[in-house]
Image (cartoon, coloured by chain):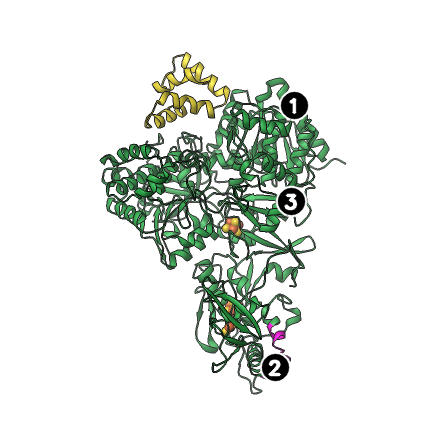
């Protein structure tokens, strides 16, 4: 999961515009709620190894 | 055969010579006036009037040859009797096809042919099926005056010995080496049709005529057909007017009595065939001339490899068991469905609504796929649906959706006839999409240029009369870097099509992209170390593509199955927009999709986040549309993808799966993880023809039906919706759509479809791009390409003609990111995977046909240099290991692969190449990274423990108890 989330962040960081927002909406559109919960839990526990953009995005994810 | 064909077809006669395009020319034939395009032959013009001039060496799939002289006619004002097949029409020409003179000539010609032909018509396998016989009748030949001289000496090719027992040196034995057809030289009339078919249609150049005059013979240049370059496409058999080249099935079973047009169920080309039947037995599949994808051509799979339908391992009765340690119990349909429904509902009661899901098939029909996703959305009440397209073309959907506004490939196959430069990336069409490859090669022989980007020297790079102008043999995993470097050259050298970009694309985004790509770190020189591609070649390729005229890009799984699959698709779209190559014939971005209905399964809403027609489940208006028709609420949250289902299963929150026509255990990456996920589920329902690998972990097995046993539609790689027609009753009792309906109804759905056409009507009612599609239209047109609706009532061969679907085309910055799958001291080589012509995907069907003669086992291709370092020689057993696992297989030493790269196929379960592949995947879509795995290769003595354990488990899991009764 960490790997997947970071891959998404890497792509959107290379794009113009606000990467955090784009990562959050990508995750909202494509990840099942269970996976989003997992991500949020993981961030709450410290989010070791996660890209900073993902950590910020996690707060925005639906 | 006197054709009784369903549906009543457009004119299926052999018109003698190919259609031409040109300005109209009028002439008079036998007193009737006819107008045809300039360049048309007199023979074809006569055929247009319904006048069939006798012929032997001409057929309308091949250019005229003019060797048999049977087709002579008289033309006013011309001397002699010209051959009508090679004589083009001229304005005001007056032709007579019947006169005393030509009748005499034709009879004489025929007599000569027949004098050297065995007169065993009644017992000949071609009886009633061959032109030679028909023509003898047509010219009124009743007896043959020529006889062998009394004093011995041979003047024929068809008698092995003369009456005194002497061997005839002119006689040659039958060649039975090909599993599907025979070559019987004694019946050959040396008309050259097979040789021309092999060249013109297939492009294999396997056949030639050897010798001259009486000695001339068809030759394969080797000891027999099997050992030759023949790819067994069947074009020669199709072309032969005699029984010389003949299907073995016809020899065994005799000629068919009716035929039905249907669609091949193997690959994404979607060839149309006539299924020729005797009662309800299939005797032959013949490519259908009016099939718009294949135009009368075929490959070995669709033409010949249909025997699996009657294979003894096919399962015809439903089976159940409580645990996978038990043997299977055969039960009736009612019991099996009841058992499955109760289990699934029970799981939902215990573990929640979202604890079960489905996997739809890219092999089943659109209608069946639609029902399976409807099952999960409307009956299970969640969006847990996914399909094997996840593992192949999901990045295409995302990448093209982002740039062009639709995931659709932009062209039809006919478009290739207008292409000047073809760019093939990560695709191996001669093996993967053979009939398209033949059409492509034909265009290349006519002068189009070819650029290949592939780590392997695929056949297309150099084969008979085709040679790539540039082959960029990149290191696996560097696609984005290479395509971006091509864009760099095009932008910095000023080769862009600015008018196109200004008119059709978002100019601001273009400028942002141009600034990004112009950076010297993207230049061929700067990236050469990374990609392994010579910068000069790269620059030359970019210039050729930008300047060479109509440029078309064809790509395959070598693009999508990477951690940057979606990014590569976007970079390809960028390249097409930069050079103005979208929106007309001969150009475009063309994903070559793998399985027959990958396109369809994606269109039909197989993905967990989108409803049919690629509309996100979060959109309330789209949900409402379906809610109105289905009468149930739809979950607005995306569901689980296949890898997520497996993860959730291991975590204990996903418990039940209905898997139709897929073998995820063999086809999905990281086999051990898949096995663990399946083993953790409490109810796995496998719906398939055979006890596939996934079924080893299943609790319910529902027998499937073949494409010959049901009605429906497949959608091919050009978005073409082709009809599949039922030619025989399902041997298992039900079409797959009926089985899904039984299961849905046992869970309370209350569906009442009685024919797949009703399902298509529901699809049309809910999906705007299918709004105009119904079976009546398909019957009338043969096929249509979606979008097909009020705006495009006859379908859409070319996309984005008047502008991009999303409005302005969008350039997207494509930064190369190295995959995390890196080589290192322990795993110094890169493994990439692919497939071959005679086998198909996991091989469940093709392994059960005589096609195994061409591919008995998966082999590991390794460069001589790497082999030598490891002390390996051709044919050695080798151990192939990655971070995920290891397996063994035999090595094939070849310089088709570059040093540092190894390659294998994944058709055989014993090899389990996916034990090796890792679970890294595309960032946007989770499409697995099949094409890059760091591995080590070393010598080995035989199968690994894992392979042996696996085989033992499979053996145990496949036991079937004899039916209790
Ligand atoms: S094998 Fe058939 S098609 Fe080929 S030259 Fe002989 S008769 Fe003609
Ligand atoms: S496998 Fe593909 S190319 Fe071959 S006959 Fe079938 S659809 Fe055509
Ligand atoms: S058919 Fe015209 S020469 Fe043979």
Q: Which segment is the magenta one?
A: B135-147
Q: Quadrant of the N terminus of chain B?
A: bottom right
Q: Which residue is mark 2?
A: B144
Which disc is residue B345 wearing? 1
Tell me the quadrant of the picture where the C terminus of chain B can be found. top right
Q: Are marks 1 and 3 in contact (CB under 8 Å)?
A: no
The picture quadrant where one finds residue B713 is: top right
Q: Position of residue B455 (x, y in %)?
A: 35, 44
Where disc 3 sits, the SS reads loop
Q: Where B368 sits versus B924, above or below?
A: below
Asked if one can make out residue B901 in the rendered structure from this viewpoint, the answer is no
Mark earlier in primary sequence (2, 1): 2
From the viewer's perspective, is residue B826 above or below residue B857? above
Tell me whether marks 2 and 3 sit on the same chain.
yes
Q: Are marks 1 and 3 on the same chain?
A: yes
- Front-lying residue, B916 or B758: B758
Horizontally, is B498 left or right of B718 in the view? left
Locate residue B206 relative to residue B49 in the image: left or right.
Answer: left
Chain in yellow on the image: A
From the rendered image, report the letter of the chain displayed in green. Answer: B
Chain letter, disc 2 residue: B
Q: Position of residue B659 (x, y in %)?
A: 58, 33
Q: Is residue A59 visible?
A: yes
Magenta stretch, main secondary structure, is loop
B524 relative to B349, above or below: below
Q: Position of residue B314 (x, y in %)?
A: 63, 43
Q: Are marks 2 and 3 in contact (CB under 8 Å)?
A: no
Residue at mark 2: C-beta within 8 A of ligand 1 = no
Q: Dot 2, crowdedness within 10 Å: few (<14), some or many (≥20)?
A: some
């Amino acid at each position: 999961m960490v790997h997947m989330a970071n891959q998404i962040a890497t792509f959107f960081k290379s794009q113009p515009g606000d990467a955090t927002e784009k990562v959050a909406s990508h995750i909202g559109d494509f990840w099942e709620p269970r996976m989003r919960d997992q991500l949020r839990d993981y961030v709450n526990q410290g989010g070791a190894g996660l890209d900073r953009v993902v950590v910020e995005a996690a707060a925005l994810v639906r | 055969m006197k054709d009784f064909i369903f549906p009543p077809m457009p004119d299926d006669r052999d018109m003698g010579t190919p259609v031409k395009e040109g300005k109209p020319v009028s002439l008079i034939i036998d007193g009737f006036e006819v107008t045809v395009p300039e360049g048309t032959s007199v023979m074809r013009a006569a055929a247009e009037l319904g006048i069939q001039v006798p012929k032997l060496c001409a057929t309308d799939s091949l250019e005229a040859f003019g060797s048999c002289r049977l087709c002579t006619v008289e033309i006013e004002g011309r001397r002699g009797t010209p051959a009508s097949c090679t004589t083009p029409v001229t304005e005001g020409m007056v032709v007579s096809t019947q006169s005393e003179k030509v009748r005499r000539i034709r009879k004489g010609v025929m007599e000569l042919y027949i004098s050297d032909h065995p007169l065993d018509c009644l017992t000949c396998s071609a009886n009633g099926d061959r032109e030679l016989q028909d023509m003898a009748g047509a010219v009124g030949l009743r007896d043959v005056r020529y006889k062998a001289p009394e004093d011995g000496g041979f003047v024929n090719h068809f008698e092995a010995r003369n009456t005194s027992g002497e061997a005839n040196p002119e006689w040659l034995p039958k060649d039975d080496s090909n599993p599907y057809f025979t070559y019987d030289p004694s019946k050959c009339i040396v008309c050259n049709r097979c040789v021309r078919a092999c060249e013109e249609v297939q492009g294999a150049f396997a056949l030639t005529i050897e010798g001259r005059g009486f000695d001339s013979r068809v030759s394969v240049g080797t000891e027999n057909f099997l050992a030759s370059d023949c790819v067994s496409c069947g074009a020669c058999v199709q072309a032969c007017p005699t029984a010389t080249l003949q299907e073995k099935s016809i020899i065994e079973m005799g000629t068919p009595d009716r035929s039905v047009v249907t669609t091949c169920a193997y690959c994404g080309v979607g060839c149309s065939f006539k299924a020729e039947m005797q009662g309800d037995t299939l005797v032959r599949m013949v490519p259908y001339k009016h099939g718009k994808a294949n135009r009368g051509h075929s490959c070995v799979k669709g033409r010949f490899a249909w025997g699996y339908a009657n294979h003894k391992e096919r399962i015809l009765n439903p089976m159940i068991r409580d645990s996978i340690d038990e043997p299977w119990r055969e039960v009736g349909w009612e019991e099996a469905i009841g058992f499955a429904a109760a289990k699934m509902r029970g799981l939902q009661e215990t573990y929640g609504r979202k604890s079960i899901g489905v996997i739809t098939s890219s092999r089943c029909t659109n209608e069946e796929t639609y029902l399976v996703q409807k099952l999960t959305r409307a009956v299970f009440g969640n969006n847990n649906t996914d399909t094997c397209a996840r593992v192949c073309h999901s990045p295409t959907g995302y990448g093209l959706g982002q740039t062009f506004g639709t995931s659709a490939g932009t062209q039809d196959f006919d478009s290739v006839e207008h292409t000047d430069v073809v760019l093939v990336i990560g695709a191996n069409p001669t093996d993967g999409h053979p009939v398209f490859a033949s059409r492509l090669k034909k265009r290349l022989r006519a002068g189009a240029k070819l650029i290949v980007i592939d780590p392997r020297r695929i056949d297309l790079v150099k084969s008979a009369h085709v040679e790539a102008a540039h082959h960029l043999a990149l290191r696996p995993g560097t696609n984005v870097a290479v395509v971006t470097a091509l864009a760099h050259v095009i932008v910095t050298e000023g080769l862009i099509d600015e008018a196109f970009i200004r008119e059709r694309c978002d100019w601001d985004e273009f400028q942002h992209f141009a600034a990004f790509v112009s950076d010297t770190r993207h230049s061929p020189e700067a990236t050469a170390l990374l990609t392994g591609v010579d910068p000069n070649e790269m620059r030359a390729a970019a210039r050729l593509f930008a300047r060479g005229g109509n440029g078309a890009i064809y790509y395959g799984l070598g693009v999508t199955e990477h951690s940057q699959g979606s990014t590569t698709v976007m970079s390809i779209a960028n390249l097409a927009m930069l050079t103005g190559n979208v929106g007309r014939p001969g150009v475009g971005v063309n994903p070559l999709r793998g399985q027959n209905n990958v396109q369809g399964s994606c269109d039909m809403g197989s993905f967990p986040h989108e409803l049919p027609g690629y509309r996100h489940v979060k959109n309330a208006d789209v949900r409402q549309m379906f809610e109105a028709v289905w009468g149930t609420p739809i979950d607005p949250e995306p569901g689980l993808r296949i890898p997520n289902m497996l993860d959730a299963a291991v975590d204990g929150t996903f418990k039940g799966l209905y898997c139709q026509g897929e073998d995820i255990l063999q086809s999905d990456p990281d086999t051990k993880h898949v096995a663990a996920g399946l083993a953790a589920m409490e109810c796995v329902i496998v719906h398939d023809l055979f006890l596939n690998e996934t079924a080893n972990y299943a609790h319910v097995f529902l027998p499937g039906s073949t494409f010959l046993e049901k009605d429906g539609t497949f959608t091919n790689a050009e978005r073409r919706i082709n009809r599949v027609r039922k030619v025989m009753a399902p041997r298992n009792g039900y079409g797959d759509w009926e089985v899904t309906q039984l299961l849905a109804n046992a869970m309370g759905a209350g569906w009442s479809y009685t024919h797949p056409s009703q399902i298509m009507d529901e699809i049309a009612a809910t999906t705007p791009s299918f709004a105009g599609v119904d079976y009546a239209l398909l019957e009338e047109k043969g096929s249509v390409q979606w979008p097909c609706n009020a705006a495009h009532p006859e379908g859409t061969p070319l996309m984005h003609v008047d502008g991009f679907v999303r409005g302005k085309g969008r350039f997207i910055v494509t930064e190369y990111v190295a995959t995390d799958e890196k080589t290192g001291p322990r795993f110094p080589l890169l493994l990439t995977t692919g497939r071959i012509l005679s086998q198909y995907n996991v091989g469940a069907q093709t392994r059960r046909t005589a096609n195994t003669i061409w591919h008995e086992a998966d082999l590991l291709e390794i460069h001589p240099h790497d082999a030598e370092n490891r002390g390996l020689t051709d044919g050695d057993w080798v151990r192939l290991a990655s971070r995920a696992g290891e397996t063994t297989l035999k090595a094939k030493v070849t310089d088709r692969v570059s040093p540092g790269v190894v390659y294998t196929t994944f058709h055989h379960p014993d090899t389990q190449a996916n034990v090796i592949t890792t679970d890294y995947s595309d960032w946007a879509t989770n499409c697995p990274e099949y094409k890059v795995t760091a591995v080590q290769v070393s010598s080995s003595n035989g199968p690994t423990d894992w392979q042996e354990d696996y085989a033992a488990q499979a053996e145990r899991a496949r036991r079937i108890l004899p039916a209790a009764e």
